[in-house]
Amino acid sequence: MKRALVCGAGGFIGGHLVKRLKREGVWVRGVDLKFHEHAETEADDFIVGDLRDQAFVRSVIDRSFDEVYQLAADMGGAGYVFTGENDAAIMQNSALINLNVLDACHKRNIKRVFYSSSACMYPEHNQLDPDNPNCAEGSAYPAKPDSEYGWEKLFSERLYLAYNRNYGMECRVARFHNIFGPEGTWEGGKEKAPAAMCRKVAECPDSGSIEVWGDGLQTRSFLYIDECLEGVLRLTRSDFEGPVNIGSDEMIAINDLARLAIEISGKDISVNNIPGPEGVRGRNSDNQLIREKLDWTPDAPLRDGMEKVYAWISGELERRQSQS
Ligand code: NAD
C-alpha cells in the first residue's frame, strides 16, 4: 500500500489533500500544529506537533513514505501577509519548517517531496498593470517579491531544488495562485478574498453595503481546490520538477469578485471601497508551462467554485446562529 505524509494536514489545502489521497487508497499520516477546524480528518494517523522542532520532525518522518506533501506554512490573506507586522515570524517559521522537513526526508532516503510555493514570489514590477501582469515562470528573476512571505517561498523553492541537484532527491515545486474552496479560513483576518467576499455578503442585510480594500480594480485569479489537488498529484507523479504555476487564468478585478458573490446571493448590495492592504496591482496564472509539461490545465469557471463557497459559508453562519 502506498504511504504518504501530509504536512499541514490540519489546514485548508492539506485537509482536502488527505481526503483525496484516502479516496485513492493511500495510507496517510497527517501532521499539523492543530486539528482541522472545519472537518474530521480522514488521515489514518494524525500527529499534532510543531514542525519547527527538528526532533519532532524526525519522529514524524520515522519511516519511508512514497510521497511527502509539504504544505505547512505560516500564512494568511492580505490582512496577515501585507501589513508588515508578521514579517519576521513568517520568514522564521516557514523557513524552519522547510529546512527540517526536507532534511529529515533526505536522511530517511525519501525522494518524492512536493513543495507548495506561491505566486507571491513573482517580482512586484511585473505586476503593476492590473490588465496585463506577467507571471510566467521564467519571469521570477531578477527577484523582487512584494512581501517577506514571497521571499521565504523563493528561498525554499531553491532549497528543494538544491536537494534535487546535490542529493538526488525528486522534489516537485508548484507556485499556487490563490486557492479557494469550502473548509478554508473564512474569518479572523487570515482569510483570502473569495471567502472574505462570501462572508461579507452572507452577513450583509439586503440593500446594505460591503467594504472592499483598495480601489477594487486590482486583479487576481482564483483556483478551486479540486483542480489544485489534481495539479498537485499530476506534478508530484510526473518527471517534471518545476517550479510551475498551479492556478487559474480567469483573471477578475476584486470589485467584480465582490459583485459575483452579491449576484450569487441574490441580494441587493453595494460595494464600498476603503483603504486597506491589497498587494500587487495585478496577478494572473500563466498556464503555458503546465500545459506543455503536464498536458493539463485547470478550466473550471470561477463562478462554479464561488457558488460552492458561498453556500458553505452561509451554512456555517446559519449553524452558528442556530446554536446561539
Ligand atoms: P493553511 O494555513 O490553511 O494551512 C497551513 C497549515 O500549516 C495550517 O494548518 C497550520 O496550522 C500549519 N502549520 C503552520 N505552522 C506549523 C508548524 N510550525 N508546525 C506544524 N504545522 C504548522 O494554508 P493553505 O491555504 O492550506 O496553504 C497550504 C500551503 O500552500 C502553504 O504552504 C501556503 O503558503 C501555500 N499556498 C497557498 C495558497 C492559497 O491560496 N491557499 C496560495 C499560495 C501558496
Image: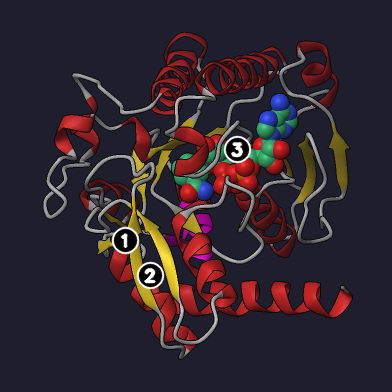
Please provide the residue range marked out in magenta.
223-231
258 within the magenta span? no
Q: Amino acid at mark 2?
A: Ala
The answer to whether residue 31 is left or right of residue 155 is right
Is 203 left, or right, of 215 in this rendering?
A: right
Mark 3 to mark 1 CA distance (whole Å): 26 Å
Closer to the N terminus: mark 3 or mark 2? Answer: 3
For the question of whether residue 246 can be seen, the reply is yes
Q: Residue at x 42, y 51 (%)?
A: 178
Query: Mark 3 near ligand 1 (CB under 8 Å)?
Result: yes
Task: Mark 1: give few (<14), some (14-19) or many (20+) Cα within 10 Å.
Answer: many
At horizontal 29% and vertical 70% (from top left) the residue drawn is: 256
| Residue that label 2 marks | 258
Q: Return the residue nearer the eye: 114 or 112.
A: 114
Residue 254 has which mark?
1
Query: Of the residues tagged 3 and 2, which is closer to the observer?
Result: 2
Which residue is located at x 84 percent, y 59 percent? 40
Tell me: 176 left or right of 297.
right
Q: Disc 3 vs disc 1: which is toward the camera?
A: 1
* Total labels drawn: 3
Label 2 near label 1: C-beta < 8 Å?
yes
Residue 230 vs residue 249: left or right? right
Task: Please state the horizontal and vertical placement of residue 253, each as a whole percent of the image.
Answer: 25, 62
Q: Position of residue 250 (x, y in %)?
A: 27, 65
Q: Is residue 244 above or below residue 165?
A: below
Graded by Cα atoms within 10 Å as few (under 14), some (14 to 19) or many (20 or more), the crowding at tag 2 reads many
Q: Tag on residue 71?
A: 3
